[in-house]
Image: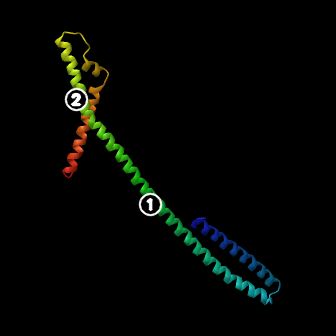
Amino acid sequence: MNTLEKLQKQLEKDQERIDRLNAKVAEAEAAILQDPDNQKAALEAAACDKQIEAANKAKANTLQEIEAEKQREYEREVETARNMLTDIEKKANAIRDQEFAKAREFFNQYEAWFALVKQHEDLARKYDIKMSNLYSHDQVQAGMTSLKQLMDKWQAAQQSVEYWRNHGG
């Protein structure tokens, strides 16, 4: 049972005590109404009033403790959320950095691909062999050339970010 549950149980006990004392006061007052000279009932009613006052203070203290515990619990949840956010950020950054590294590798692969396309074209031309033009074929399929254009834009955006980071922007 956690602290908040314990305090809730205490609150219930406080309220039960107040309810029992109120019932006693009602009985004592009923006895006084029937016999105004009943000192025992009058003393019991007065004693119960004082006990109710003390029980109400105890209940108020318990309510304050509950609110304080709720605040502590909330602060623990916020701290847990902060830790989770930090962890998520680290994981997201690691994935981003990994994928950026892969993306940068594209340029090397594109150069290798482009050299093969050029070699294919030169060899076909040299021996007058009718072959499809790999570069044109790639453009029709929105292949490596389209990807290269997008990667050039991405690289330019990265360079812009880096420039502004280094020059106080």
CB within 8 Å, label 1 to label 2:
no
What amino acid is labelled 2 in the image?
Glu
Q: Say if 127 sits above or below 112 in the image.
A: above
In the rendered image, the vertical position of residue 129 relative to residue 3, given as above or below: above
Give left or right: position of 99 versus 14.
Answer: left
Residue 21 % position (x, y) = 72, 78
Q: Nearer the viewer, mark 1 or mark 2?
A: 2
Q: What residue sits right under mark 2 in the picture? A: 111
- Residue at horizontal 63 percent and vertical 71 percent from the top: 10
Residue at image location 18% in from the left, 17% down from the top: 122
The Cα–Cα distance between marks 1 and 2, rounded to whole angstroms, is 49 Å
Q: How many marks?
A: 2
Q: Nearer the viewer, residue 22 or 103?
A: 103
Q: Residue furthest right?
A: 34
Label 1 packing within 10 angstroms: few (<14), some (14-19), many (20+): few
Q: Residue at x 37, y 50 (%)?
A: 90
Disc 2 residue crowd, few under 14, some 14–19, many 20+, Cα 10 Å = few
The amino acid at mark 1 is Glu
Q: Residue at x 75, y 85 (%)?
A: 44
| Residue underneath mark 1 | 79
| Mark 2: secondary structure | helix
Q: Could you say where residue 71 lies in the image, as x and y percent from the top left?
A: 50, 66
User: In which quadrant of the rendered image does the N terminus lie?
Assistant: bottom right
**Above/below status of 115 relative to 35:** above
Question: Residue 61 appears in which quarter of the rendering?
Answer: bottom right
